[in-house]
Amino acid sequence: MDDRTTVEAPKTGAMEELARDPSSRKRFFKMVGGAGAASAFAIFLAACGDDEEEEEQQPAQTQQEGGGGDLEIVQYALTLEHLETDFYNAVIDAGVIEDRALADTAKSIRDNEQEHVDALTQVVEQLGGTPERPSTTFDAVIEGGPDMILETAATVENLGAAAYLGQAGRIESKEILASALAIHTVEARHAAALNRVVGKTIVPDGAFAKPASMEEVLPQVQPFLAQ
């Protein structure tokens, strides 16, 4: 009899399942919008391919210890969306953006972020969790004036897009992956618009977006979280 402890293999993520199963992939594309979703999904696969390959080479136990499942990912995304929404509300309330077009853009992006918050809050509840809302502060940014505000907005939106991409390979539910992909696309559009405003290239990563892990993202947003 073999007394060695058997380690259960990790669940197959939604990305891997969709990459391998054409019928599942077809249903997924219908769920999130056809051809546009197919293009975005290809970017997800290209950007996450190396990370997935590395994960496959790790022992199953290591993979299990490193993740908290879809609920953890959605809570993380909800934190970032609250931060973005709070940021735009602070900017709008301060009234420091005098350019009418930019002010309208800020309001439009704020409305998108609030919708993301509402949707992710519902997902957290559906997964049996309690939605968490961080305390935020943007006083230093607001005091820095319009240029600092716009630079921060571009940074936050680029970071948000990278954060969603960074979690794509970990998501197990195809429905949650579809939501993440749809939100990632909008965040990337926000980032591109703001990159242009601050004089940066609209695609700083080049032809393929680069993902960012939680360990990379959270320290960058820490200054905006009230202690």
Image (cartoon, grey):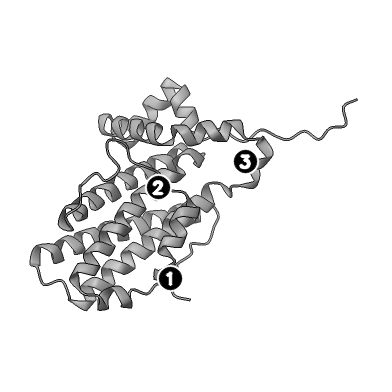
Query: Residue flagged by tag 2: what amino acid is it?
Result: Tyr
In space, the residues marked 2 and 1 are separated at their CA atoms by 19 Å
State if disc 3 and disc 2 touch (CB < 8 Å). Answer: no
Percent of width and height locating residue 201? 20, 47
Percent of width and height locating residue 92? 21, 72
- Read off the residue under disc 3: 63
Outermost left residue: 100
In the structure shown, which secondary structural element does the residue marked by tag 1 occupy? loop
- Read off the residue under disc 1: 225
- Read off the residue under disc 2: 164
The mark nearer the N terminus, 2 or 3, is 3
| Residue 143 placement: quadrant | bottom left
Describe residue 95's horizontal placement relative to residue 6 as left or right. left
Percent of width and height locating residue 171? 49, 41
In the structure shown, which secondary structural element does the residue marked by tag 3 occupy? helix
Query: Residue flagged by tag 1: what amino acid is it?
Result: Leu
Quadrant location of the N terminus in the rendered image: top right
Q: Residues within 10 Å of mark 1 (few under 14, many from 20)?
A: few
Query: Residue flagged by tag 3: what amino acid is it?
Result: Gln
